[in-house]
Amino acid sequence: MSKKARVIARLDVKGPNVIKGVQLECLRVVGKPGEMAEKYYLQGADELIYVDIVASLYGRDNLLDIVDKASDKIFIPFTVGGGVRTLDDIREFLKAGADKVAINTAITKDPELVSKGARMFGSQCIVASIEARKIGDGKWEALTDNGRETTGLDVIEWAKKVEELGAGEILLTSVDNEGTQKGLDTDLIRSVTDEVSIPVIACGGAGSSEDVLDCVRKGNTDSVAVSSILHFDKATIPDIKSTLNKDGIEVRNLD
């Protein structure tokens, strides 16, 4: 059976803008959420991810509005994260049109939110977001609040735990590589994918279509979220999918 891969466009949102930084810092405005989401949808992205990077600090009403508007124009699955603290928060995003909800900070403080959410809405709706920073050889610590806070949690053990609690997917972001466009941390990704059976969306560091291919092959993942290479016109969704397809990886919506 041939290997399949999803190419996912990630949009980090702050206020009315899509922003992009390096290692989750030095943020710059790159566009508007609605325009960019529609652009990547029309290019053939398999899914979209919206993350409000300040919602944990300032609330999530802005993202709810973005999700509501996107659901009228975007007809592929999309995941929303940022400021999710309760079952009611999850419900609101799903009612607004999101297919899945990504949670990071809240579940490190109350892991049972994963199992409660999975029971109420289905595991397929619950994405455990893990921001990983390398702290030693083969060791990474989970961070929260857009890389601002440490947790003391070992990334690999935490990934196993959220799967056990009922998460349907993991969004794994390398804080060290994020925004650098130097390639994804395939050691981190492989360390997690080898230990869990649920899908792992790899994120952080893609600078070319070849980097995405390298991640799929070496990281043993079938899902890669990209942002910088799209936002700064280093590659398009069709470019990435063509590179994967030429290497024998099955992709969808390749014209």
Image: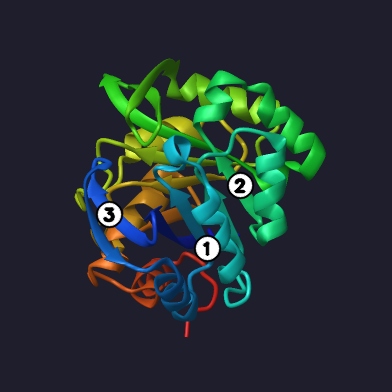
Q: Using the rendered view, name the quadrant where residue 133 is placed.
A: top left
Residue bearing mark 3 = 20
Crowdedness near tag 1: few (<14), some (14–19) or many (≥20) residues, C-alpha within 10 Å:
some
The picture places residue 101, in percent across and down from the top left corner, at: 61, 47
Mark 3 or 2, nearer chain start: 3
Q: Using the rendered view, name the quadrant where residue 226 is placed.
A: bottom left
Residue at the farthest right position: 120
Residue at 65% across, 52% down: 93
The picture places residue 227, in percent across and down from the top left corner, at: 34, 59
Q: Nearer the viewer, residue 248 or 74?
A: 74
Q: Secondary structure at mark 3?
A: strand
Residue at the farthest bottom position: 255
Mark 2 or 1, nearer chain start: 1
Question: What amino acid is at disc 1?
Answer: Ile
* Mark sitting on residue 101: 2
Crowdedness near tag 2: few (<14), some (14–19) or many (≥20) residues, C-alpha within 10 Å:
many
- Locate the N terminus by quadrant: bottom right
| Alpha carbon distance from label 1 to label 3 | 18 Å
Residue at 33% across, 32% down: 147
* Mark sitting on residue 66: 1
Residue 124 vertical position relative to residue 72 in the rendered view, above or below:
above
The picture places residue 55, in percent across and down from the top left corner, at: 46, 42
| Alpha carbon distance from label 2 to label 1 | 14 Å
Question: What amino acid is at disc 3?
Answer: Lys
* Mark sitting on residue 194: none
Residue at 32% across, 53% down: 214
Mark 1 or 3, nearer chain start: 3
Q: Secondary structure at mark 1?
A: helix
Residue at 49% across, 75% down: 41
Question: What amino acid is at disc 2?
Answer: Val
